[in-house]
Image (cartoon, helix red, strand yellow):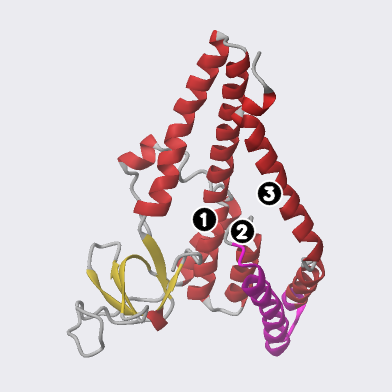
Amino acid sequence: MKRPLQDPFIFICIGAALLFSVYAISQFWEEDPKPLLKQAQESYKNGELSKTTPERTKDFNHSLEILLDLEKKYAPVFGNGKLYFNLGNNLFQLEEYPYALLYYYRSELLRPRDEKVQEHIAITQKQLGISVSESETPFDWLFFFHNRLSLPERIQLFFALALLIFGLASCYLWYSRRWIYMAIFALTIISIPLLLSLAYSYALSPLEAVVVKSSQLYRDAGLYYAKVTPEPLMPGQKVKVLDVKLAGKWFKVKTNEGTTGFLPENSTRLIETSSP
């Protein structure tokens, strides 16, 4: 009979339990953000009810300051996207439409199925005079879940499947049953597209950015280089970031029309805040 300590899954379970325990203990020292979130929500509601422009601006700015502090402290790149959505709402009310669109895009990364986020993106694009038409690629069709599930959701699903596979593999070491083997095989097949999706997100997916300030597109990293197009890129446009030059001072980008050039960093903001 097999000894328990010869089962590798036992050590995986122990390691997972230890990691979870460390995480749970660390939460006791974390400051509860709920009072600040409530305060920001109250300021936002007051701004909506205010009858004068100065009062509205004051309330929305106060709510915005609280949320920006929370964003800086918690960096919720793997959160549920609500903080980014609320930041976008405040910026929209303050008529900072390019920055509002930036935060709505950040929220969309974490809430890809939220119709409300999609509606706010469309409204903000309309305010900026932006029309977007996106065609479905073969990758989108084959990996349909890639854009329907956020990156945190895909990571959680992949590790849940991996844990289940390891658990069944452990059972198979003890009881060699055909149905266990078939279950392991089926779950492995399901997990492969998820793994490819994660690999694409981390290694192959291009960075995207939003133009937050109107800027010319240059042929190289410098204001003294020739302009690629006579007209500047308008605020709110989404571009693909191909490269970063001069210690992050310039971005080599590609527009939706296929035009390639360089934009100064101060006119552009990356959508994925976890990116370097």
**Residue 57 x, y percent position in the rendering:** 67, 85
- Label ID, residue 19: 3
**Residue 31 x, y percent position in the rendering:** 79, 68
Magenta residue check for 74: yes
Along the polypeptide, which appears first: circle 2 or circle 1?
2
Q: Quadrant of the N terminus?
A: top right
Q: Secondary structure of the magenta portion, mostly?
A: helix
Q: Which residue is mark 1?
A: 109
Write the residue at 64% across / 76% down: 68
Q: Report the front residue among 20 and 88.
A: 20
Q: Report the front residue among 18 and 272.
A: 18
Q: In what element is the residue under mark 3?
A: helix
**Residue 51 x, y percent position in the rendering:** 75, 82
C-alpha span from label 2 to label 1? 8 Å
Along the polypeptide, which appears first: circle 3 or circle 1?
3
C-alpha span from label 3 to label 1? 27 Å
Q: In what element is the residue under mark 1?
A: helix
Question: What residue type is disc 2 on?
Answer: Gly
Along the polypeptide, which appears first: circle 2 or circle 3?
3
Question: What residue type is disc 3 on?
Answer: Leu
Q: Splitting the image into 4 quarters, where does residue 171 fall?
A: top right
Q: Which residue is mark 2?
A: 81
Magenta residue check for 178: no
Q: Splitting the image into 4 quarters, where does residue 29 fall?
A: bottom right
Disc number lying in front (3 or 1): 3
In magenta, the rendered stretch is 47-76
Write the residue at 73% across / 86% down: 55
